[in-house]
Every structure is written in C-alpha cells, then in structure tokens.
Image (cartoon, helix red, strand yellow):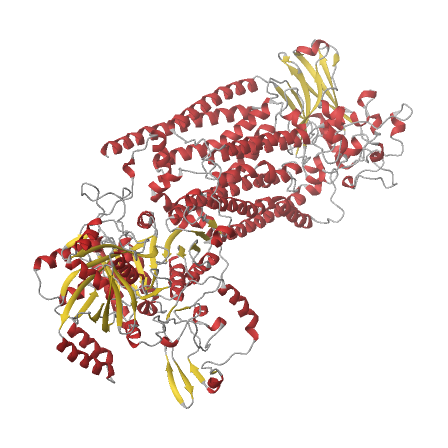
Amino acid sequence: MTWSATARGAHQPDNTAFTQQRLPAWQPLLSASIALPLFFCAGLAFIGLGLGLFYSSNGIKELEYDYTGNPGTGNCSACALADRDRAPPLRCSCSWYFSLPELFPGPVYLYYELTNFYQNNRRYSVSRDDTQLSGLPSALRHPANECAPYQRRASGLPIAPCGAIANSLFNDSFSLWHQRQPGGPYVEVPLDRTGIAWWTDCHVKFRNPPLVNGSLALAFRGTAPPPNWPRPVYELSPDPNNTGFINQDFVVWMRTAALPTFRKLYARIRQGNYSTGLPRGAYLVNITYNYPVRAFGGHKLIVFSNISWMGGKNPFLGIAYLVVGSLCILMGFVMLVVYIRYQDQNDEDEDEE
Amino acid sequence: MLSVFCSGEVVCEPPNNKLDRFSGTLYWKESKFPLSNQNMLLRGCVLRNTEWCFGLVVFAGPDTKLMQNSGRTKFKRTSIDRLMNTLVLWIFGFLVCMGVILAIGNAIWEHEVGMRFQAYLPWDEAVDSAFFSGFLSFWSYIIILNTVVPISLYVSVEVIRLGHSYFINWDKKMFCMKKRTPAEARTTTLNEELGQVEYVFSDKTGTLTQNIMVFSKCSISGRSYGDVLDVLGHKAELGQKPEPVDFSFNPLADNKFLFWDPTLLEAVKMGDPHTHEFFRLLSLCHTVMSEEKNEGELYYKAQSPDEGALVTAARNFGFVFRSRTPKTITVHEMGTAVTYQLLAILDFNNIRKRMSVIVRNPEGRIRLYCKGADTILLDRLHPCPQELLSTTTDHLNEYAGEGLRTLVLAYKDLDEEYYGEWAQRRLRASLARDSREDRLASVYEEVESDMVLLGATAIEDKLQQGVPETIALLTLANIKIWVLTGDKQETAVNIGYSCKMLTDDMTEVFIVTGHTVLEVREELRKAREKMLDSPHAVGNGFTCSEKRSARLTSVLEAVAGEYALVINGHSLAHALEADMELEFLETACACKAVICCRVTPLQKAQVVELVKKHKKAVTLAIGDGANDVSMIKTAHIGVGISGQEGIQAVLASDYSFSQFKFLQRLLLVHGRWSYLRMCKFLCYFFYKNFAFTMVHFWFGFFCGFSAQTVYDQYFITLYNIVYTSLPVLAMGVFDQDVPEQRSMEYPKLYEPGQLNLLFNKREFFICIAQGIYTSVLMFFIPYGVFAEATRDDGTQLADYQSFAVTVATSLVIVVSVQIGLDTGYWTAINHFFIWGSLAIYFAILFAMHSNGLFDMFPNQFRFVGNAQNTLAQPTVWLTITLTTVVCIMPVVAFRFLKLSLKPDLSDTVRYTQLVRKKQKAQHRCLRRVGRTSSRRSGYAFSHQEGFGELIMSGKNMRLSSLALASFTTRSSSSWIESLRRKKSDSAGSPSGGADKPLKG
C-alpha cells in the first residue's frame, strides 16, 4: 500500500469538468423539428434562387461564331488552309458578317473562345516565371528553369517573357464594324482593350522592369522575345501604359484557364453610341487570322455577350438550383410521411407500455 | 551437517508446471527416500513458525514450477488496429490502381492530343513517346494522390488513445478512497477494445472476494442469531446498521471482530449451556495455531481463513483458544483457563467433509466435537426432536441462500471404555499397510455417528464492494463472465451464488468432475444433451432434431434456458486437450456462467487462449495475484487489481484499478466511449481524405492526365495538418453519444461494440463511398458552373486559380459541416476547433494570396490577389453553397430516416432523454435477486487435510508453534520479471538432461 501511495503519487484525481468528462456541451439531435424545416426552407430558398438565376441567365444574350475555318464554313477556311504549314508571321484576314434585328443591350463584351486547348496541363501551366513577370531586373535575364524549352534562345539570349504560356500567346485580333443604314458605310465600333484583366494582376502580379533612361525597350535589352512572337514584348501595344508585361491581352492570357474549353475577354464595348449596347443593324467582324489551332483539333470562336449581376450566361447554376431545391422539398415530404407514420407507432407503443 | 549430505543424490522429474505434483527419490547413504509434493516448497513460499530449516534447491530460475506456469509476453494490438492495417494496404492498392488508370489515360492523351499540341507545349527532352510519358505520369499521380493513404491517421489514433487513457487515469469514480489508488491505464493502445469485450475471465480470491472471512450468523439449538435488527425488531435495511456488539467485558477479545446481534452475547452471558457448548466446540475443534507475543495479544495462524473466523468468533464470545500442545488445548472459558486433553483429531478431507476432535475435559469426560457439511452431518445425528432439525435446516437454507458458507456443529459423549477400544482400532488402522486411508475413514465414520446437533455457523466470504451488481450489469451487457479460480469447487460455487452468477432460477448447473478423458467427455456430452432436450430450448422445438444432426455448435448457441457449468481442474486438463477442446468450448459457451475451479495458472491462460482462438471474441482477464499473470498476458486485455499486496498482476496488466466494481465503468463507460469515438474518428478520417484526394482523379480527365493538382500546393500541405485535423481530434477525444449514467442504465448500449458494428469493412466502404461521392460533386459542380461562366465584371471566371480556390473552399466547408454532423457532443473545445478551423482556413487563404508575400517570393505565392477576387463573386458563393447542400443533404436525410425507421438504442436513449428530461427510473435494468429459500448446501471449507496429523504428531512442534509453510502467491518483489531477464542471460549455460541428478 505504501508502494502505491508513493510510487504513483496517489492524490485524488481533480474533480474538474474536463477530467471527469462532464464539460457542458450542446448535444444536438437530428429531430424532426430541425430536419423537416431545414429541408423545406432549403428547398424553397433553392427554388427561389434557382428561378432568379435561371431567368437572369436566360435574359443574357450571347452571339457566337466559330471562325476556325474548317472547310466550307465561311471565309476563314482560306486562312485555315494556309495555316497548315506556315511559319509565323502570316497575315491572313477574314471576316464575319452578322446582323442584329434588335438592340443587343450593353454593356457588351467581346470574348474569344478556344476549345481543346489544354492551358491546364501541368507542364504548360508551370512553364512561366512569375519573378520575371513581376519585373525583377535580375530575374529578367535569368529566367527560371520551369520555362524550358522556352528559357533561352539558341543564341543564349534569355527569353522575356519566358515559358510555354507566353510563347503561345493568342495573337488573332478583331475589329468590329457597324453598318448603320443598309447599304451605308461600315463604321468602326470602338473596342475598349483595357480593364479586361484583374486589377491585382495588372498592378501587383505583372510589372514591367524599371525603365532604363525612360525607355522600356532599353530595359528589355539583352533579352529576346519568345520564338513565336513576331515582335518584342515592349511593342505589344503603342500605349505605354499597356505594353510590356502589363499588356492586358498578355495578362489575360497568362491567367491560365481551368478547363480545356475556355473563354477570355478580348474587349469591352462601352464607348460613344455603343455604351447602351449594339443597336440593330448589320455588323462585320474583321479577323486577323494568326493563331493555328486545327493541328490539335481545336476551335476558335468569337463571342458577344452581355452580363447580369451573376456574370455571363450560365444556365447550369439556375437549373442545378431548381433541381436541388425540388429534391429537397421532395425529400422533405418523404421524411414528413415517414415521421408521421412512425411517430404514431411510437406513441402507440408508449401507450401500450 | 551440510557437509554430511555431500554424498546425496536426487533423481526427480523434469521441470514441469504441475503445482500439486512432484515425484523424485533421494539417495543418501545407501538408502532411498521418496520425495513427493509434501516435501516440496515452491518458489515464493513464506516459511512460518520456524527460525530455520534445511533445504535443497531442486529447480531454480526458469525451471521452477511457477516460472513454468508463466506464459509468454505478447505484443497486444486491437482488432481495429489490425483492420486499419488491412485497410491501409487496400487503400494503397487502390492508389496504385488509380495511378495505373491515369497513366494509361495520359499515354492515350499524349498520343491522341498531346502529340499534336506540341507546337504550344513540346514534350520534355527525355520523353520520346506517349508510353514513356504515361509511365512518368504514373509516378506523378502516385505522389499527388498519396494523401488518400492516411499517414497522419496513425499519429492521430495514438493521440486519441492517449487522451482516452488520461480520462481513465483521471476518473474520480474509479479512484479508491480507501486505498488511495486511482485507476491506471498502463497501456495506451487498447482503449477502444474495452468497448468490445465479450468474455471476462475473473480470478476469485482478491478479485471478486476480499479474502476475508467473517463470522456472520449462527443457529444455536433452533435459534438464529446474527440478523441485523433495528429497534423495533425488524430486519434492518442496509446502510442503517446499529452499533456493533460491545465485547469490552472480554480483555482477550479481538477488537477487529464485529457482530451486530446483541442477543447472542446476552445468551452467552446468561450462561445458556447450548450456547456455551457451541462456542466451546468452535474453540476446540480446529487446526489453528496461536501465538502470544505479549500477554493478552493473541495471534491466530489458521490454514484457512474460515477456521480463523470461527475461532476468532469463539474468542470474542468468551471462549478464547489460548494455546495448544500436541496433547492439550488450553481455552479461557469466560475468563477461566481450562485445559483439555486432546485425544484425537479426525482430520478433514474432501470425502468426509467434516473434522472432529476428541477431547477429555478437566472433569475427565470424553467428548467428540464435530463440524462439517450439512449434507453429511445431518445424516449422522442422533434422532433428535424433529422440530430442532427442521428449524436448523431452515436456517441453513436461509444462510446458503444468502451465499454464506455454512457448517453444522455437533457433539457426542463417549464413555471411557468405548473410546479406549476405538483408539485401539484407530491405531491398528493407521498402521495398516494397505488401504490405510479407507480403514481410517471407516473407523472415523464409526465414531462420528449418533451425534447431538448443536447448531450451525454461517461465514461470509466477504465479496468486494459492488461485485454482484457489477456482474449482473455486465451479464446484461451480454458479457460472459467465467470465474477461473485455484479454489476448491465448493468455495467457488458458493461465491458463484453469492455474487449472483449462479442463481436458483437456473435450469441446471452442470458439474464436471471426471478424472479420465472418457468421463469428462461423457459429462460434457450429457450436459449438451440436457440443454438441447430441455423444453426451454429454442422456440421452435421441432426443428431441433434436424439441427442437432447437422451441427451441434449452431444449436447450442441458441439454447434458451439458463445453464451454468462448473468444471474441475483435473477435468479441465482433459477438456483442454486438442480433441476435446471444441466440445468443451461449445458446452461452456452455451452456459450463462462458467466456473473453473482448482485450475493452475497455465490452465487459466489456456482457457483464455481457447476462447480467443475459436470464438473470435475479445477477452478480458482480471486478477490480482501472480497466478493470474499468464492469464492477464494471454487475454486481449489484462486488468490487474492494484492496491493489494502484490503488484505482479498489475505489472503484467494493461489496466489496473483497486476494485472489481470499477470494471463496469471501465467497460461500459470508458470502453464504450473509446470504441465509439475511435470508430467515428476513423470513418470521418477516411471520408475526408477520399473527398479531398479523389478530386484530383476527376480533374485528371480534364487536364490531359498531366498530374495537375486541383488545389494550391499550400492547401494540399495544410489540409490534413491544419484545416481538418483538430475538429476530428476533438471529436475523437471528447465525443459522447449518451451520458455515462445512461450506459449503466442501459447495458445493451454496449452491444454494438461486441458485434463490431460501428467500424468494419462495410462501414469503411460506406465512408469511402461517401468520400468519393463528395469528391465527384466537389469537382463536377464547379466544373458545370465554371465551364462557361464569366465574372460580374465581364472578365473570365474559369481560370485555374479561381477554380482551385472555389473547390478548396467548398471542400473545407463541406468537411466542416460533416464533422459538425458527426459531432454529437459539442463542448466549448469542439466549437473552438470547428469554427477555428474555418476561420484559420480563410485567414491563411487571404494571407497566402496577399500582395506582401508575393512581393517577397513571387514564384512561391502565385495565387496573389486570388482570394479577394474570387470570393467576391456571387457565382462562386452560389457554387459553394450548392456543393455543400448537395453533399450534406443526403447525409442528413439518411440519418433522419434511419433515426425514424431503424433507430439504434443509443439514438432512442438520446431521444427519450431529449423529450423527457426527467427520465423515469422504470428502465432500471438491475433486478434485485431475492432468493428466500434454496435447497442448496452452502457448505464450504477451504482447507486441506493433513494438518490434524501434523499437530497430533508433534513433529516440527517447536516452542508450541508449528512450521506451517504455506504457499503464498503474493510475494513483494517483481522476481518474475528479473528472472525473465536472467533466463535470457543464462540461456547459453549448460543444463542437465531430463531426469537430472542434483548433487548436494
């Protein structure tokens, strides 16, 4: 007994709620008064939301055109044929004529869509150097190894911007022309090419290297453009605030897509007469066809769309909400029936006792 | 003297584990001396009443009989552990399968698409074919998907077990105030198995009983004494005992002796001749030795505690046994010393079940005093008034019904002439060459007849506190209790009755005592036949015969009547042989209670092993002494009773506490909770890992099987460690389904553990399925939404980083809601961990995506600005909500329906508790077993024959004390352990052959 008293320091255990496992606790039970209202409320809320989503999605207008140029589909097939075995740059133009019977309400957004393009492939999406893109001068001339094989040119010059993503920059360009009166001249619709990327991307993630003697071109001296590029990065746009790494087309492209079919914003139409939308009339999209996609079975589309509070056209969300809401209600009814039947039984059992 | 012995030689049997047998021969000076068990002292014995003795060590170390009885120490693991290992292996196989599928996918993709996509994404230099690319992608996927193999599972499981062990150590209700010993979980690896125990093997002495005998009642010439009466003369209820009887008139009284009925003392003081004769008998007819260190300080050394109790009772009532010599006994009768001449001791043995002394009192009258079993003694009484006989019998039945050990006392006057003649015959019989025993027995039988009934005594073999209640409760929890004891059959059966294992309601108690294989087999067969033939057997009696022909096992499991089996050590030895063990097991398992008596420590272990091997059930052994060590080591869980004299059982045990009654709390509360928590924990753990990892698998089909992860690398690192570990740990440590008092009230709550219902392969697959279901929704709902979505400012939404953040956020929310559903007991800690995990997720998310970190390490924190941009979108939140609801609602609906249609007992208990806060006590499952009359003999006497002879011979009688060597099982050091070490050290040393001669 002395052994147990000394060797184990046999003081009485503390009488606290913690040691005695008596902590005050909330013990929820999935009772009918919780579960049934939960299901009905969730169901109703979902159906309500679903209806809202469905109608706002339906209210969105979309206009899309596949200009890949597969044989016999419009006048881009000539360019498509040419793209078979060409080396850039090739300047091929084609156009898409369409007419709007009524106003296409604004603001209207112009997207390009690529299909079967695996921007989410791991090897593709790592092939970039964010340090270089953030404008660090040391990284500019020493691109990261992930960029290989687009890390350095054969001449040994470092590539800026390096990597497969940058190299595969989408370089088709579009211009939109509006024919106000039938037979009249086509007037160019102004396309706003800014404000198409996230603010954080343009101002934090992507930055040009510090200017040398006030010149961006000098800052990029000693680097080479990616092999596919016809011109260096500092000449992407004549606008000094939209060129170099912070060129918004480039920034948009560099934000890689999650899925092999993706849409990227090309321009916003919001200036002048077109701020309320595209008025009725005949239109023409002039396409500079540079970007080859037929080799891997991809498609290129041009899309006009407007948006609502929840973004672009998205029928999936509305339908999913409606379906789930209905299922909740249905399940709620099943549970209610089961509950009523079995509660009666339980009550009887208790009475018998 | 030692040098004289140098020429001696001992030839003996090889080392074995039979404690009660030894055969050998001592050759010394051309003469042979047979050596038997009588000449042996076993290791651990304490030599009493002598200052010294000569001995010869025959076996030492691992060769000793006691060491031969100790089993091997095995590493114990729980069944859940083993299952977990299997499952982890399966999961590993599953991982490889996924890797192969995705690798094949990659090879096909690279061949069909990737090859033609090379203008934008050329293959790596080393990769020359789609096949090789697939091979590389296999390894990439093994790395990415490895989170499906729960590596942190083992650590978490250990943490939870540690927590449970601490709860056991801290439990105030398992702290013994008297001995100041807390319960102790000596191992942290077996906790959840405590919730699955089906068989409890218990030692008797020191575990069920306190090994204290108390003289509790007696019947003297038709009047019963000893009932505790209140003032009005009614039988008092427990707990309101009046003052004990005051023995201060007697200076020699033992003040530890308590008696509650003052009328007996009054009768003694009044000088009632029957009462005086009664106590005189008790003070004369025994084999106790007395020791008086100082005047008036008497110490009795009794071979059995029963005798000690009887002599002490006589002492306190004024008949003090003072001292004895081989020829005399001195007794202080009511203050005056009287010396009786001891003429003969007719010793006790198992067949006679009685002992007598023949004494001549100072007046010269010769009288025989006899005490013994009622069944034997009542037949050899002088025809006396029928009334006295029947009242005494009634009293005896009453005592037996209370589980007391009874003895009947009688005396007989002998005349000088007859005695002289009888003594001659006895002498002749004792000198007879052949069948000496039988002759002596018949001579004894002749004189022990026509005796006059004096009365009866009832001794209480004091049970430990709360033993019957504990056993009743454990039985209700479907735990089968087997008592394995070294005690005699009568003693064991008696204890069986007093702790309510055996009841009179039982259909039959089978007693197997056969000495040969055939007898045992026959007895077992008969027992089985009886069980099958009884009208109680199953409801559908007519199918019985068919079943019986098919296979006995299945039928016996379904026997409805209550049976009990008592089996003796020597029968057990046969029953445990390979060809009979299954028969024995079948029979024993069909019985409600099993008592094995006279078993050796090794047999205890064998019985445990037998059940372990064939029943696939979790066994628990509980004991307090060194003789229980092997059983404790063999059973899945060993429990030691601590705070007693020895610590060997405790040292070998996995759990220890100081009272048997704590077992119910250990099993029904701690064990049950541990099992429940562990199962819930495992289910959730597998679920969350599958839900997390399988998303990569689905994404593989949309990213060219390029081993692209869905989540940010930091999320993958932190998911298991930070975002989801603590809530599930808190659940694993703190969860409770019903409060502790309910698990005592409804012992049936224990059953899911025994049936292994809460976590088995089926449950595992359900968890996995739920995990995979979640992962499918987790990927495809965002996929559906993102495929064409744009943000509310017109820019692209479906970029990879936003997708990653959306899926990760919905995953964290879904698994948090799921743990919320699984947690049944929300303490402040659970709240803190669950809400804290969510909060920390968002905090880390925003920190990782902040500008500051990007400015420092642009390549490490590529997700800059993502959190605020993505999570500001209503579409994203709509997606997260949708995913959460779709993942959780089916679970809620399923649980609700299960609660309504097929509720578990625990659900019902919780529900009723919720509805009626004030639970009526109607569900009390403990039934008080009221047994008023029993036709059972409560006779029990726990000592062996041979001591009468020793006393009469005067051999070894030195200074009126006797060398009484008794084998004690409790020695105070852990010599077994130290021996074990030595054994391994000396393994290489040479040792003799089988019959090795030992030179002195």
**Which quadrant holds residue B37?**
bottom left
Name the residue at 83% across, 21% down.
A240
Give the total of numbered labels.
Answer: 0
Relative to the observer, which residue lies in front, A336 or B303? B303
| B966, above or below B100, in the image | below
Name the residue at 54% across, 52% down.
B89
- Which quadrant does the C terminus of chain A fall into? top left
Residue at the right extreme, as displayed:
A213
Name the residue at 51% across, 27% down.
A320
In screen coordinates, is A131 left or right of A222?
Answer: left
Residue B216, how many percent across, how many down?
A: 25, 54
Relative to the observer, which residue lies in front, B84 or B743? B743
Relative to the observer, which residue lies in front, B807 or B175? B175
**Residue B510 in view:** yes
Residue B145, how many percent across, how many down?
A: 60, 44
**Residue A71 in view:** no
Residue A331, how many percent across, how many down?
A: 41, 29
Relative to the observer, which residue lies in front, B65 or B188? B65
**Which quadrant holds residue A236?**
top right
In screen coordinates, is A150 left or right of B482?
Answer: right
| A101, above or below B19, in the image | above
- Which quadrant does the N terminus of chain A fall into? bottom left
In screen coordinates, is B332 left or right of A154?
Answer: left
Residue B642, how many percent across, how many down?
A: 43, 54
